[in-house]
Image: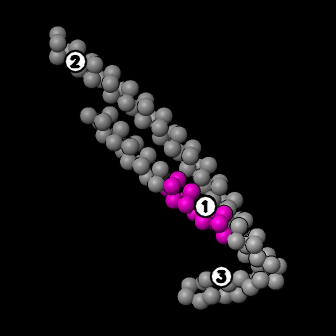
Amino acid sequence: QTAATEYQKLKDSYGQAVRSHTDLMTQLNENEMVMKEFKTLEDDATVFKQIGPVMVKQPLEDAKQNVTKRLDYIKGEIVRAKKIIDDLTDQMQEKSTQIEQLQAEGQKIAVA
C-alpha cells in the first residue's frame, strides 16, 4: 500500500511538472511572437513597457534585449522541466514494476 501511495505522489508531481512545462511553452511562444513584432518595427519606433498600471516609454533596443534575456531564461527552464518530467517518468516506471511484483507475490501467497 505504501508503494501505491508513493506512486500516486509521483503521479501528482508528474502532473504538476507537465503543467509547468506547458506554461513555459506558452510563455516561449508569446515571447517569440513579441520578438517577431520587434523585428518588423523601424529603429526609431516607440515601445512602451507596462509597469503596474503605468505604461513607460522604453528604447526599442532595451526592449529587444529584455525579451532576448527572457527567451534564454524560459528555454533554460524548459530544459529543466523536461529533465524533471523524464526523471519522474523513470521513477513512476520503477514504482509500477515494484507494485506489479508485490501483487504477483500476493497472488502466489493467496493461491498457496
Please tell me in which quadrant of the rendered image residue 83 appears.
top right
Question: 16 left or right of 24?
Answer: left
Position above or below: 30 against 99: below
Residue 59 lies left or right of residue 99; in this view the side is right
Residue extending furthest toward the top: 112
Q: Is residue 31 magenta?
A: yes
What residue would you read off at disc 2? 107
Secondary structure at numbered mark 2: helix
Label disc, if present, on residue 18 of the rendered structure: none
Label 3 crowd bin: few (<14), some (14–19), many (20+), radius 10 Å: few
Viewer-side residue, 84 vs 78 = 78
Q: Give the image quarter of residue 92.
A: top left
Judging by the rendered image, the residue that carries numbered circle 3 is 49
Residue at (61%, 83%) from the top-left corner?
A: 50
Disc 3, SS: strand
x%, y% of residue 24? 56, 58
Q: Amino acid at mark 2?
A: Gln
As drawn, 64 above or below 27: below
The mark that comes first in sequence, 1 or 3, is: 1
Query: Which quarter of the image is occupied by the N terminus?
Result: top left
The residue depicted at 17 percent of the width and 10 percent of the height is 112
What stretch of residues is rendered in magenta?
A: 20-35
- Secondary structure beneath disc 1? helix
Instruction: Give percent across and percent down for residue 66.
Output: 71, 71
Disc ID at residue 29: 1
Cα–Cα gap, marks 3 and 2: 65 Å
In front: label 3 or label 2: 3
Q: Would you place residue 36 above or below residue 83 in this image?
A: below
Q: Nearer the viewer, residue 37 or 10?
A: 37
Front in this rendered view, residue 108 or 39? 39
